[in-house]
Each structure stands twice: as structure tokens, then as C-alpha cells.
Image (spheres, grey):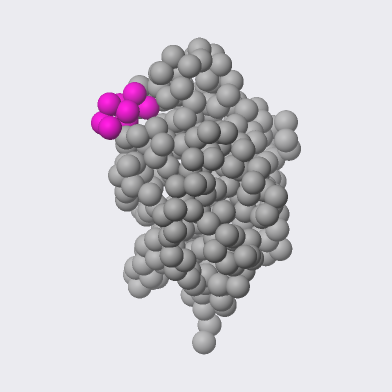
Amino acid sequence: MSKPKILGVVGPTASGKTDFAIDLCLERGGEVVSCDSMQIYRGMDIGTAKPTAAEMRGVPHHMIDVADPCEDFSAARFSAMARGCIDDILSRGRLPVLCGGTGLYFDSVVSGISYAENKIDPKLRRSLMSLAEENGAEYLHDMLRQVDPVSAEAIHPNNVRRVVRALEIYRQTGKPKSEVDKEQRGEPLYDAEIYGLLWSREELYERINKRVDVMIERGLIDEVRNLLDLGVGTDSTAMQAIGYKEAAEYLRGECSLSEAVDKIKRESRRYAKRQMTWFKRNPDIIWTNIAT
């Protein structure tokens, strides 16, 4: 039997994925399924570049605002929910268009990964978290890079919980998380036509820097202040997102606003590089240069 047809739009941050995906939807009768690990959170709009109602241009969007920012959200949970959205879109004769830059989440949906449950060892987790607290997030990330460079490339050092989880899997199975993921990968569930958006490094970095400036103008600092006032912990996964972590540091008086903005731009550029490294490993992606 033929597999259901879906489209995908991937690429680095600030590459124009949302507009490209919406254009595809308008041309081919589609609906967007977001594959962004931070757009799932309610109240995190500016720093995640969540599309506004006007920017959506009437195209339905799924997997946005589905969780509170105090929640942890796994790739397994995301893929189950996103596949439910895809099934619903297909049942109505519409075309699902997956759009996002979180490579792990995107692959978890399209690649038929069956997630095995690895039991949590509370003692091991406490030990790893203590190492991060005593030596810093970069120290723990370096530990992961030594045993699983592929996962380390995909996980931001700030995301201590995901770094810890990857190290837990290695300690428990004796295998890198990236290898365990490959073993759990089954037959692709869909006939996926995936477009990747390309820019020159200079153009992309200029777009990233401009986007950050716009986020500040639109009120990113107030957005982060509101989340903190609502009780969202600075150690939560949501608050480790690029832009939110740095804004929180500014609000705590740990740096100036200009220093926070510069750091957001720098971390965003580094993230873009990691995203391209991840997606370039997929030979099925159709790369498209959309620079004008």
C-alpha cells in the first residue's frame, strides 16, 4: 500500500520556513504542523517567532500552544501528538505540511521511531544534575560530546535536562543515544517530500541579528518577565530556550541589556549551525536557495 503523502519544510532559524510552508499550504490545500520544540509552549510567542494570526494567512496551524511552559515535553510525546494531527488532516482530504527547525522532533514524526522506555535512575540523575550545578552546563555537555558527539551536536548546552537524559541512556545501555535512536527507527510512515531552505552564512546571520532586534522591540523582555512572574522556573526546559535564558539573566541583573542581546544573537547563530549539521545528514531533503 502507498504511504500517505506529506510535505516538510526545514532549515535553520530565521530562514523563512513559516512563510515558505504557508505558501505551500495555500498552493496545495495544506495545513501546517509545527515541529518547533518551543512553539508548543503557551505564552512564549515573541522569542519563538510564533506566527501571528495575520501571518498564518488563514492556514490552520497545529502543535502550537499545546503545553504550559512549566511542562517537560519529550520527542516521544511530541511525535504521538503530531501524528494524530497528521491523521486528522489527511482524513479531511488536506495535505499535512510539517514545518520547523527542531530536527529531533521532525525526524521523530516522519521516521517511524519507536521509543523504548528507559527507566529513570534517580541516583544517577541527581549525580549528573549535581555535576551541572557545580561545574556548569558546558561541563556536562562536554561529557556528552565525548561519548555521543552526534547527540551533543543536536542538543544545546543550555538544555541540561536533555543532556542529562542522553547521558542517562548511555550509562544505562552502554550505547550513545544517537545509536539507540537508530535502532528504534522503523520504516518511514509517510511519503515525505521535504524542502530545506538555504542561505549564505552572511545573509543568514544578518537575518538572525535582525530577528533578535525585532524580538526585543516587540517586547521579549516583558514576555520573559511575565513568565517568571507566573512562576515558570529558570531551570525549566522552556526557560532554557535561546532568548529566554539570556533575558532572564538580564532581569536578574547578571548582565546588561546589550550584553544579553549580543548573547542571544551569538547563541542563535551557533544554533543555526547545529541545525544545518543535523539536516545535512538527511539525503532526502531537497535544498532550495530562496535568497532574493
Residue ID at (44%, 30%)? 244
Is any part of residue 16 visible from this angle? Answer: no
Q: Extreme bottom residue here?
A: 1
Where residue 269 appears, x then y in whole percent? Answer: 64, 33
Question: Magenta segment, which residues?
Answer: 224-231
Where residue 140 appears, x then y in whole percent? Answer: 59, 42
Is any part of residue 276 visible from this angle? Answer: yes
Q: Is residue 83 left or right of residue 285?
A: left
Q: How many marks?
A: 0
Residue ID at (71%, 63%)? 283
Q: Residue 229: within the magenta? A: yes
Query: Taken as a whole, is the magenta stretch helix, strand or loop?
Result: helix
Residue ID at (49%, 40%)? 130
Q: Is residue 26 left or right of residue 265?
A: left
> Which sits in the foreground, 118 or 35?
118
Q: Is residue 5 left or right of residue 58?
A: right
> Which sits in the foreground, 14 or 25?
14
